[in-house]
Image (tube, grey):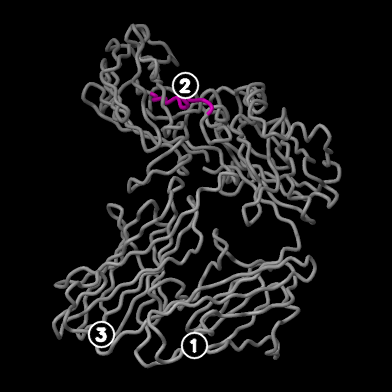
Amino acid sequence: MPNTNPGPVALLWRPLSLLVALLAALSLGVAATQAVASDVTAAAQVTTTLDTDGVTTGPTGEPTYWDWERVTMRVTWAVPDSTRSGDHFTVPIDPALAAGSFIPFDLLDPEGAVVARATVSGNLLVFTMTSYVDTHQNVHGTAFLQLEFALDRLSTTVPNVITVYGTRIRVTHNAPPTGEWDYKYAWWQPTETAATSRDERGVLVQRTKAQIRWAIQLKTRVGSPLRDWSTLTIIDTPASGTHFSCARDGSGTYTGLRPRVEVSTLGSGGPPAIAVVSCAPDRLVLRVTKQLTDRGVYHVTFDGWLDTDAQGRPVYRDEVGHVHLGFHPAGYGNSAVLDYDGWTSTVANAITRATQGGTGVGDRYVPRVDIEKYQGEWNGITFVDGRALLDEAGQPASLPAGDFDAAPGLDVAAGAATTITLRITNTGGEVLNQVRVTDAGAAAGDLTTPVCTLRGSTAMPFDGLAPGESFTCTLTLRAGFTSPHRDVATVTAVGATTGAPVTDRDEFHAFTTAQPPVVTPPTVTPPTVVVADTPKPLLRIRKVPVTRRPWAGGRMTWRVVVRNVGRATARPVAVCDRLVKASLIGRTARVRYVGKWTTMRVRVRSGRACIRIPRLDPGQSVTWVITTRVSRIARGVLVNRATASTPGRPTVRAEARRRVQPFPGAVRPAVTG
């Protein structure tokens, strides 16, 4: 939004001809389909608005922009049920706007399916429908994107009050630099579309030319009182995701930097000279020299490059050093220290990508069922607007606290019996018939036969399980069961309309512990047990993966349980998790402590995430649910280790594993940040 300080100079508007040519080269393969497909614009329901939330209003009440800012356009749309794959509808781009920052993007449904693809052609946004419309009805959605102002349509002398998609806004031209301020800015070259476009493998199309051009506006005089300067040293440092190219040709010219002094107002001594003092990928030193009495207005420009992997795909590192595939969501920062004959100043800025994306959704008969086996209480799967709230792996977004679907499982006191619950939920959009529940553990004698009840009936198979409806079964893990214990509960059903069979399964693990705890350690001490002399705390830790089918780039949830089985209070207790090929989502943790779920702060340092528990009395336990984002380049088995420690006692450790599925490259996320 506008401010009282001079902003970046206005960039020249690039004509759309280059953009159209580039998009033709990056065709998504729908041109042949469109040749025989239909334009459904006349039948589509489309509303276009300008989003001015957070924009400062001017003296007469209009939202006010600088001419170098982007504006956010929002589209709501719906297509008729007769629409077929390859059909498209168009939305005009307002004549006051230009699409130099537009990147083609996909419109996704809540499960990641591509509903439509957005491109641009001339002054039209084109939304092309995929095969999604062939299997869904009532298809509708939204889209949002940022566009630039068409500067050639704006007056250069007075503020412009224009109407864009029915909204009156004020656009103020950026004042020419005067040399009173120094600041930094940047632009994508030749356009954001060209600089950041990728092929079907995710490889940058523009790899042999710099993608970013940095600029530093210089002060004409410095200090207090003001004085002239003759030598300026610039020390520039790029942030994560970008670097400098120090390549030189045979004459010694830095072809990957192209440093220049640009003239806004020429002074008395001719243009200043610029030289490269030193160059490294993460540090650039430039020197600008001029006559002391020269009071011209100048700015320095040079190239910046996006970091890529060996294949040419953009990458960046997060704050703890993990490498991520893709563009940095926070943008690309850059800072410089300016030394004007001993008077110093620091300038910084970041270049961000245009924010854009979209959603789509439709109704289809899709049978689906979920079974969860657990001990204790659980309110079931959460539904929002009639849809089951599932995570990226397709499992409930919030699992039961007593969901022990991986070894070692539930710790059961020797000689005790335990009641176990099965909850079966219709998470699809179709009524289910022939619903039947079985448990492999019942035949082995450890478990009683499940007793299931749906609307008062206990006679399976059940018919008529409606979408969103659920029922429970109960069974007992008998006293004296064989330890360790593992069983698998399975539900099968058939879609009432489609006749399609569906199934789901869930494991349950348990073990027994002799009471009281063993005091004398065995010859080889298990890594998860520290045996302490009475009366000292004795910690036990176990870790299980919650997410059943994690994939690279998706979420992975782990559960860590630490219990004090000793006879003295442990205070404090540090529980830590090593982040391997993953990064923590958020800086707070969901923790069950003293019988209640609460939120605690997580400290992340050197790739380890830790929480601090003030005290853990004998018999008490703490459960930490850890949600991470798996690196998109992760492969094979993901090994994750957790530790627990308390002063004066050895650290205990636990390890859990899950095989990671490759990143589903066929489903491309919307372009953001």
Foreground tag (1 vs 3): 1
Give the x, y percent position of residue 619.
29, 85
| Residue 208 located within the stretch drawn in magenta | yes
What is the three-letter code of the residue carrying label 1? Gly
Q: In this rendering, does residue 62 appear at all?
A: no
Residue at the spot 83% in from the left edge and 50% down from the top edge: 80
Checking the image for residue 237, the label placed there is none
| Segment tinted magenta in the rendering | 205-217
Alpha carbons under labels 1 and 3: distance apart? 34 Å
Q: At numbered mark 3, what does the secondary structure look like: helix, strand or loop?
A: loop
What is the three-letter code of the residue carrying label 2? Thr
Give the x, y percent position of residue 338.
29, 27
Residue at the spot 43% in from the left edge and 49% down from the top edge: 635
The front one of 491 and 123 is 491
Q: Are marks 1 and 3 in contact (CB under 8 Å)?
A: no
Alpha carbons under labels 1 and 2: distance apart? 68 Å
Checking the image for residue 445, the label placed there is 1
Question: First in sequence: mark 1 or mark 2?
Answer: 2
Q: Quadrant of residue 499?
A: bottom right
- Horizontal side of 209 relative to 139 (left or right) equals left
Q: In this rendering, does residue 496 appear at all?
A: yes
Q: Which residue carries the number 2 mark?
A: 208
Q: Which residue carries the number 3 mark?
A: 618
Q: Residue farthest to the front? A: 444
Give the x, y percent position of residue 229.
27, 18
Q: Quadrant of residue 256?
A: top left
Q: Residues within 10 Å of mark 3 (few under 14, many from 20)?
A: some
Q: Residues within 10 Å of mark 2 (few under 14, many from 20)?
A: few
Depicted 289 relative to depicted 402: above or below: above
Residue at the spot 48% in from the left edge and 26% down from the top edge: 211
- Horizontal side of 5 relative to 96 (left or right) equals left
